[in-house]
Image (tube, grey):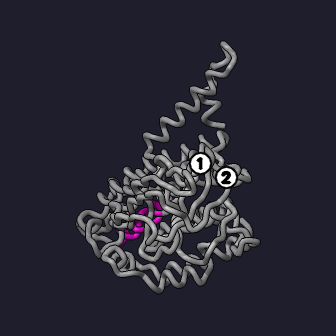
Amino acid sequence: MEQTDQLILDTAQRLFADHCGADVVNAAESGVAPVRLLTALLEAGLPLAWVPENAGGVGGSLALGFNLIRQSAGFALAAPLAETLVANRVLAESGLEVAESWTVLVFDGGVLPMLAGGKISGLVESAPMHAGVTRLVVPVSDQGAIRIATFAPDDVEIDYRESLAGESRAQVQLSESVPLALSSAVDGMSEHGLMQFCALVRACQIAGAMEKMNELTVAYVKERQQFGRALGKFQAIQHKVADIAGESALANAAVEQAARELSEHSRPFSGSADTLLSIATAKVVASEAAGTVSRLAHQCHGAMGFSYEYPLQQYSRRIWSWREEYGSEFYWSERIGLAVADELKHSAPGQNDGRVWDIVSR
C-alpha cells in the first residue's frame, strides 16, 4: 500500500472513531441526522477518494477506496460514504462533473431505466438513499449503451424505505423525467460491470463488519464471567470464537483477491470475464460467512447481543441486509457455475479432465 493511501486510511480511522460511536448509529436509525459526522467526512474529502485529481478529487487507487469502505463498515458508518464513493467514480468515468456533496448511485441490479427522446423512464426498486443526498446518479440504457444521468431528489418520485439494518433505501420512479445532466455513451461500462463492482463493495462491507463482530466477541468472552471464570475459558466458546475468526479471515482474503484483480483493469465497470470469478467468489464467501458469523457471535453473547444499547446488533443486521443486495450467494454461485460451464464448452474434446479446478482456482 502506498504511503499516501495509508495516511488517508489513518485519518479516516480517527474520524470514524471520533464521530461514529454506537450511540450515533442508533440515533441515526431513529431519524437524528449525524450532522457532525457528515460534515467531517465531506471536509476530509473522503467521498472524493476515487475521483481523479484532474476532476477535483483525491486520485486514490481502487484499493484505497475498497479499504475505506471495509474500514467504514467496521463502525457501522451512519453516512452514505460507500454509495457516494461509487457514484462519484461513475460520474468521473462518464465525464460528468463531480460535486463535493452526498451522492448515490440509483442502481440495484435490476432493469435499467430507458432513455427515449431525451427523457428517462423506469423503476429502480431498492436504491441506496440518505436524507442528506443532493444528487442522484442513474445509469440508463440507450439502445444497449450505458449513459449516466443525474437528477435532484425533488425531480423524481421517491418512496423512502428502510433496509433490515435501518439504512435508508428507496423505490425511485422515473416517468419521462428530464435529467440535470446526461453523459454520452460511456465506453467500457456495462450493466453487468456495474453489478460486479457494487457486489464487491457489499462484500467489502460484510468483511469489515465481521472483523468488528470478531473483535466484540473476543472482548466480551474475556470479560464476561460464568461459573467463576471467563466465558473464554470454556472450550465450547473457544471453538465458536475460532470459527468466527476463520470465517472472517476467509472473507477478507476473498475480498482482497477480488479487489487486487479489479485494480489491474483500467475500466472497472466493464464486467470483464477476467474479474467475474474472483468478484463472484468474494460475494459468495462473504455472504455465506455472514450467516455463520452472526449466529456464532450472538450465541457467544447470549441475550446481550440482542440489546439495542450493545453494538453487536448493528453489525449483524447490516451483514444480513448486505448479503442480499447486488446478488445473494445463490445468485453469484450460479454465475460461477455458468462461467465455468461456458469455458468448458469451448474446450477441445477430451481436454476437460481437471479443468474445473484449474478454472476456479487460477
Quarter of the N terminus within the rendering: bottom right
Q: Earlier in the sequence, mark 1 or mark 2?
A: 1
Q: Which mark is residue 88?
A: none
Q: Residue at x 66, y 70 (%)?
A: 97
Foreground pick, 178 / 57? 178
Foreground pick, 336 / 135? 135
What distance separates the C-alpha of mark 1 from that of mark 2? 8 Å
Residue 167 visible from this viewpoint: yes
Q: Residue at x 67, y 72 (%)?
A: 6
Residue 233 visible from this viewpoint: no
Quarter of the C terminus within the rendering: top right
Q: Is most of the magenta stretch helix, strand or loop?
A: helix
Amino acid type at circle 1 is Asp
Instruction: Kindly indicate whether the residue at mark 2 contacts the one at mark 1 (C-beta within 8 angstroms).
Output: yes
Say what secondary structure mark 2 lies in: loop
Segment tinted magenta in the rendering: 209-223
Q: Residue at x 45, y 40 (%)?
A: 331
**x and y, in percent, of residue 191 in the image:** 57, 47
Say what secondary structure mark 1 lies in: strand
Crowd tier of the residue under label 1, counting other residues whose Cα lies within 10 Å: few below 14, some 14–19, many 20 or above: some
The residue most toward the top is 350
Residue at numbered disc 1 = 142
Amino acid type at circle 2 is Ala
Q: Is residue 102 left or right of residue 30?
A: right
Q: Which mark is residue 185?
A: 2
**x and y, in percent, of residue 107 in the image:** 49, 56
